[in-house]
Amino acid sequence: MSESDVVFKKLGGEKRFGEDKVKIKENYVRFLNKTGGVVQINIKAPREELIDTYEFFSKINDMESLGMDIANSGDRWNHYFRGVTDLTEDESGSGYKFQVTLQIRDAAPQSHVR
């Protein structure tokens, strides 16, 4: 994993080979903290860079546990998955985008993403 990647990892639920984690370049990801422990993640990139990431989130069930490893810091932020928007073309035409909503579960460290 590159120091500039964000890795999302399923921490529970149904795991299938190759579908328990996904990584994307950190510069494609923007985080927005909302009230009540909600985190909105805006992801924008060229379509070919987003397909695996979008498919990963599309297969997660509501309230499934996720870990997030930002820039190789370890997946110490644990969340419940709350939803994903449709993959749409950016208004500027420079790429595609979607949003992921997570609910903070706890801040306790978990095992590192491998």
Image (tube, grey):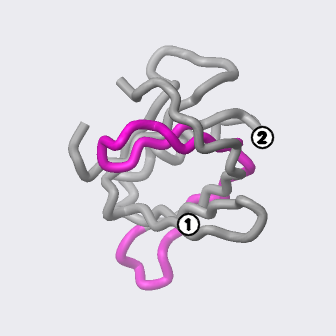
Whichever of callouts 2 and 1 sits on the residue coming sooner in the sequence is 2
Quadrant of the rendering where the C terminus is positioned: top left
State the image coordinates of residue 24 (x, y, percent, origin top left): 36, 48
Quadrant of the rendering where the N terminus is positioned: top left
Residue reaching furthest to the front:
108
Q: Secondary structure at mark 2?
A: loop
**Relative horizontal placement of residue 94, taking residue 32 as reference (left or right):** left
What residue sits 68% from the left and 50% below the top? Answer: 104
Name the residue type under label 1: Thr
What residue sits 38% from the left and 49% below the top? Answer: 70
Placement of 29 over or under 63, stated as above or below: below
- Front residue (pair 15, 50): 15
- Which of label 2 and label 1 is nearer to you? 2
Name the residue type under label 2: Asp
- Front residue (pair 43, 89): 43
**Relative horizontal placement of residue 28, taking residue 16 as reference (left or right):** left
Write down the region rendered in magenta.
67-95
Magenta-span inclusion, residue 89: yes
Q: Which mark is residue 88?
A: 1
State the image coordinates of residue 27 (x, y, percent, origin top left): 32, 64
State the image coordinates of residue 61 (x, y, percent, origin top left): 74, 35
Q: Secondary structure at mark 1?
A: strand
State the image coordinates of residue 113 (x, y, percent, origin top left): 40, 28
Residue reaching furthest to the top:
17
Could you say which quadrant of the image residue 96 lies in? Answer: bottom left
What residue sits 71% from the left and 59% below the top? Answer: 37
Q: Which mark is residue 62?
A: 2
